[in-house]
Amino acid sequence: MTTVKKSVAVLGLGSMGTALAGALLAAGHQVTVWNRTPGKAEGLVARGARSVDSVAEAVAAAEVVIVCILDYGDIGPLLEQPGAAWQGRVVVNVTNGSPEEARAMAQRVTALGAAYLDGGIMAVPALIGGPQAFVLYSGSREAFEAHRDLLDAFARSVYLGEDPGLAPLNDLALLSAMYGMFGGFAHAAALVRSAGGPVAEFTTTLLLPWLQAMAGGLPAMAAQVDAGDYATTGSPLAMQVAHDAIGDVSRAQGVSPELFAPVLALMRRRVADGHGSEDFAGVVELLDPR
Ligand code: NDP
């Protein structure tokens, strides 16, 4: 629970910036908001925010400045707005970008005399302020520790380290795992639908319990990756790729196997490289050869 009320500015009132500003207001902070296009602040103003017409006014009013706009490339001009005095501020940039962009932004912001935190929001706007959301942070540890109470208004705050690139890297790693799951769902749904089955019932009664059981094995797979030791625990790759059963049934049903094909190709390459008696996690060695 927040005990210290702070002055904070939010630059960018798209759907995410508006949700973040709303969470700060709900936590009792003094919130100043700015958006490039006027007219998006009414709801927040009605809840107690102060709307200003320039970045300079927003920065002047706040010790912490949250930046939440669409593209990283558009942040530079905001930093250069006439009269904006960044010295002594803490900039928390939750705009999605790459690790390289985050490192370059950290240099640019610290050169202006401000502290820098990069953030990766693991939530959609509706989840901000709720128990399921979390936000990854990297950059100035001092700034994170000083303002953690404020950041916790958004979601559970997870600090990853001083390298500003860590938050975007981990954010994108989580999204890649999410898309893997979505891809698996799409193929499974196509197969079930091709046989006339209701996808909703299949998903609740079979798919979710199956994925939950399989997710329980991920920590053991992660330990194999960290150790570089993929000795099989019961399902060796050679057995798994002995037949392309998923491809065969897909083609027979008129379903495209294109989502599963690259995974199968990696597994087969690993077997061809002499690792048929190892577990699936060994494909990491093909993705990240070192
Ligand atoms: P929206 O499209 O809803 O809003 C975009 C915001 O960026 C608007 O405030 C817009 O201002 C502003 N903007 C765009 N270009 C410029 C510019 N050149 N100068 C100043 N402001 C500009 O996007 P979201 O709010 O959803 O997303 C914002 C950031 O949050 C993105 O980086 C996104 O990846 C990230 N994010 C979003 C999530 C989501 O589910 N929405 C989830 C996690 C992260 P204007 O009103 O003037 O157009």
Image (cartoon, helix red, strand yellow):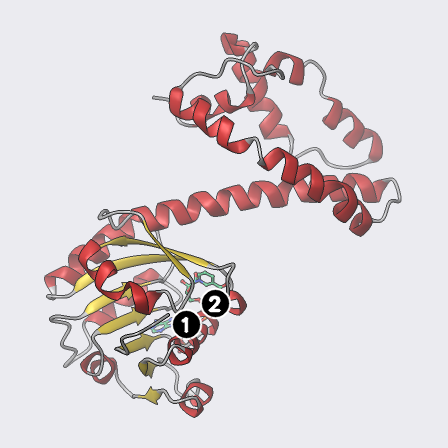
List x then y, in percent, for residue 188: 73, 40
The residue labelled by disc 2 is 128
Quadrant of the image containing the N terminus: bottom left
Which residue corresponds to mark 1? 20
In percent of the image, x 39 and y 25: which residue is there?
A: 226
**Dot 2: element:** loop
Asked if residue 165 is positioned above or below residue 215 in the image, the reply reads below
Residue at point 72% right, 41% down? 207
Question: Which of disc 1 and disc 2 is earlier in sequence?
Answer: 1
C-alpha span from label 2 to label 1 = 7 Å
Q: Are marks 2 and 1 in contact (CB under 8 Å)?
A: yes
Q: Is residue 24 left or right of residue 192?
A: left
Q: Which residue is drawn at 43% across and 85% down?
A: 44
Ligand 1 within 8 Å of disc 1? The answer is no
* Left or right: 283 as drawn, with respect to 210: left
For the view shown, which residue lies furthest in the top direction? 274
> Callout 2: few (<14), some (14-19), or many (20+) C-alpha neighbours within 10 Å?
many
- In the picture, the disc for residue 93 is none
Residue 192 at what x, y percent from top left? 81, 41
The amino acid marked with disc number 1 is Leu
Q: Residue 149: horizontal and vertical position, in percent? A: 31, 67
In this picture, residue 194 sits left or right of residue 18: right
Within-10-Å neighbours for mark 1: few <14, some 14–19, many 20+: many
Camera-nearest residue between 187 and 126: 126
Mark 2: amino acid: Ile
Give x and y (percent) for residue 235: 63, 17
User: Can residue 259 be seen in the rendering of this structure?
Assistant: no
